[in-house]
Image (tube, helix red, strand yellow):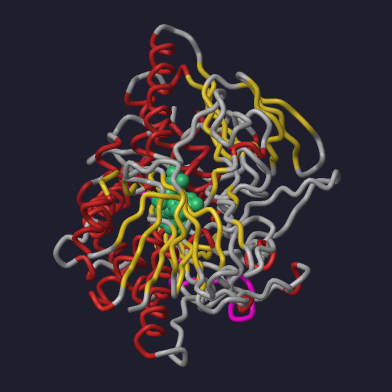
């Protein structure tokens, strides 16, 4: 009997573990190690953050689902990997520390034949002074929608701001990225327009000043170097569409900004031209930069080999070309295909946890040398597809042996569908429904836009909102492994 | 005054982009038109999802 250990029960890990358990059956064991007791449909945290959904609507308990799937569930976080075992055994193992199941703080070594790292991001609030509390958590000055609990807190703060506006007190909203190296601009984009929509519904929009602050060098970059859409016979940059929405909804923007410090009611920033400035706020949601979750690695003798297994940003090295060098040399083929670790062939990474070869947007820095550019997003659909492809590879390796062909899922060859909410409401809501193909632009194939404009499109409207709402129910249904779950694509 | 006139005057950034007029805004939440778009967007998305799996 072989054992697959999946680290992380999020989009990529949950997809991988549930498919692996189905494909392997009871002949082999699938173990999920994840610190969370509940699964969270993270995209709907935006609606929790404006009080339009509850935490309960976007989460469910993992234990029952894993019991049903025959998956061994350990509510714990991975601390370190020993891919060569230790002095007493050659068997690889992962050291975990429990966060629940009445064993909080207890450690355990879990042996594995194959391991998948799908631990997602560490929300690195402390990278920006004042954005974090200095202990790895979010600070007091801003809110976040990255977790369901953060979103509940954000909704309370928003309600307080609305009450103040109703009493005649103007409020300044500052939403965007909290560092020059952030990703996930799409989530901040959704949040600012959902707030704007809620303020209009509450009749207080005229009491609010709204501003976007972001590390993108142009609006609509989204960490993907922007995209070109076919509209009305033209092929148009997403910059024009993003700017149009901001202008229509009266949201000012400050771009190319590295948020360098956060204080009560004020941020300091540096711009791409090197100038520095300050922006005041009454309510701010600034996405933190992402890093790997900080898992260590040791060889058989106990020597630290973290640098061999993980990139400096803490994400796991896979079959990417990390030596591409300058921007001019970047190619679509630098992006990983199988997500296998180059040193240890029984180790894989999926979703946000794998180390990308380089960013997607054009690299930029201020004259002071401060890098100010979005890092690459790995959104839900690619994370799920990669998780499933890796699960497929591992199942084949277990069933057919080491010569099994590995399944491939390069972000430079897959597309992504993404629906960005701009306000919730069955007849008044809107969302930007977009597809990009491929996610990572391929300038060898498409020298101008990097993407196939027949399959890259976007439009905003109520239809997008309906799709977003249906996807919310569909993905939770799928994650709960309800009848027919395998038919729902990632 | 047309709604877009209000925002075009607010800043240079706003003035140099495009702002939808009344018709385009209405169509965004027109249930019949959006139902048609719903079908069209779903077809496009299914094609891209199919190409990616
Ligand atoms: C507010 C918000 C809105 C978003 N909206 C969209 C959207 O509309 N569409 C879209 O496609 N994408 C969206 N995304 C992005 C999407 O959520 C991510 O792409 C996706 O969650 C990445 O999947 P993942 O499995 O890599 O990471 P996650 O889903 O974050 O899962 C990581 C898992 O690992 C666990 N973990 C952490 N540390 C450890 C450890 N040490 N050991 C074991 N387990 C660990 C975590 O608890 C978690 O369960 C949004 C993100 C945010 C924050």
Q: In screen coordinates, is A109 left or right of A320? A: left
Q: In screen coordinates, is A130 left or right of B27? A: right
Q: Is residue A280 magenta?
A: no
Residue A46 falls in which quadrant of the image?
top left
Q: Which residues are magenta?
A: A443-461
If the image is split into quadrants, where does the C terminus of chain A sit? bottom left
Above or below, A193 relative to A32 = above
Residue A143 percent location from the top left of the image: 50, 29
Examine the rendering and report whether any part of residue A432 can be seen: no
Residue B13 percent location from the top left of the image: 63, 38
Residue A72 percent location from the top left of the image: 30, 61
**Residue drawn 64% across the image and 49% down it:** A218
**Residue drawn 49% across the image and 48% down it:** A186
Above or below, A169 relative to A63 = above
Examine the rendering and report whether any part of residue A138 can be seen: yes
Residue A272 falls in which quadrant of the image?
top right
Q: Nearer the viewer, residue A327 or A273?
A: A327
Residue A157 falls in which quadrant of the image?
top left
Q: Nearer the viewer, residue A178 or A133?
A: A133
Q: Is residue A445 magenta?
A: yes
Is the magenta region chiefly helix, strand or loop? loop
If the image is split into quadrants, where does the N terminus of chain A sit? bottom left
């Amino acid at each position: 009997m072989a054992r697959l250990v999946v680290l992380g029960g999020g989009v990529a890990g949950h997809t991988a573990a549930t498919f692996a358990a189905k494909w392997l059956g009871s002949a082999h064991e699938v173990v999920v190690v994840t610190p969370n007791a509940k699964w969270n449909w993270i995209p709907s945290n935006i609606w929790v953050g404006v009080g339009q959904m509850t935490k309960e609507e976007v989460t469910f308990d993992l234990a029952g689902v894993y019991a049903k799937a025959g998956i061994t569930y350990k509510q714990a976080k991975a601390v370190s990997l020993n891919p060569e075992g230790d002095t007493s055994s050659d068997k690889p193992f992962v050291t975990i520390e429990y966060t629940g199941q009445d064993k909080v703080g207890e450690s355990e070594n879990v042996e594995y034949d194959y391991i998948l790292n799908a631990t997602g991001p560490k929300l690195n609030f402390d990278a920006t002074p004042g954005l974090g509390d200095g202990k790895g958590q979010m600070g007091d000055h801003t809110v976040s929608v990255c977790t369901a609990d953060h979103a509940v807190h954000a909704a309370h703060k928003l309600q307080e701001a609305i009450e103040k506006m109703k009493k005649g007190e103007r409020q300044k909203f500052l939403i965007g990225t909290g560092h020059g190296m952030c990703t996930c601009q799409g989530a901040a984009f959704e949040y600012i327009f959902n707030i704007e929509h809620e303020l209009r519904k509450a009749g207080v929009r005229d009491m609010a000043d709204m501003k976007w602050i972001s590390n993108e060098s142009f609006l609509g970059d989204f960490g993907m170097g922007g995209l070109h859409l076919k509209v009305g016979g033209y092929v148009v940059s997403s910059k024009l569409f993003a700017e149009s929405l901001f202008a229509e909804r009266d949201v000012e923007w400050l771009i190319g900004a590295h948020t360098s410090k956060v204080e009560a009611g004020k941020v300091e920033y540096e711009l791409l031209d090197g100038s520095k400035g300050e922006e005041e706020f009454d309510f701010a949601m600034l996405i933190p930069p992402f890093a790997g979750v900080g898992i260590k690695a040791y060889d058989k003798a106990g020597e630290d080999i973290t640098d061999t297994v993980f990139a400096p940003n803490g994400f796991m090295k896979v079959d990417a070309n990390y030596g591409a060098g300058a921007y001019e040399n970047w190619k679509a083929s630098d992006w990983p295909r199988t997500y296998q670790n180059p040193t240890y062939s029984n180790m894989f990474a999926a979703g946000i946890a794998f180390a990308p070869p380089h960013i997607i947007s054009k690299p930029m820095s201020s004259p002071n040398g401060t890098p100010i550019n979005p890092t690459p997003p790995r959104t839900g659909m690619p994370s799920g597809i990669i998780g499933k492809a890796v699960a497929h590879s591992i199942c084949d390796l277990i069933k057919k042996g080491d010569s099994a062909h590995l399944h491939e899922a390069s972000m430079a060859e897959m597309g992504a569908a993404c629906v960005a909410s701009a306000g919730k409401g069955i007849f008044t809501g809107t969302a930007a429904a977009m597809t990009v193909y491929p996610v990572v632009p391929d300038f060898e194939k498409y020298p101008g836009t990097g993407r196939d404009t027949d399959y890259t499109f976007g439009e905003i409207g109520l239809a997008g909102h309906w799709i977003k709402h249906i996807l919310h129910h569909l993905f939770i249904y799928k994650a709960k492994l309800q009848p027919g779950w395998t038919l729902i694509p990632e | 005054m047309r709604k877009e006139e209000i925002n075009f005057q607010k800043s240079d950034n706003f003035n140099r982009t495009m702002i939808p007029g009344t018709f385009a805004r209405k169509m965004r939440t027109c249930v019949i038109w959006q139902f048609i778009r719903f079908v069209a967007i779903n077809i496009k998305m299914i094609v891209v999802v199919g190409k990616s799996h």
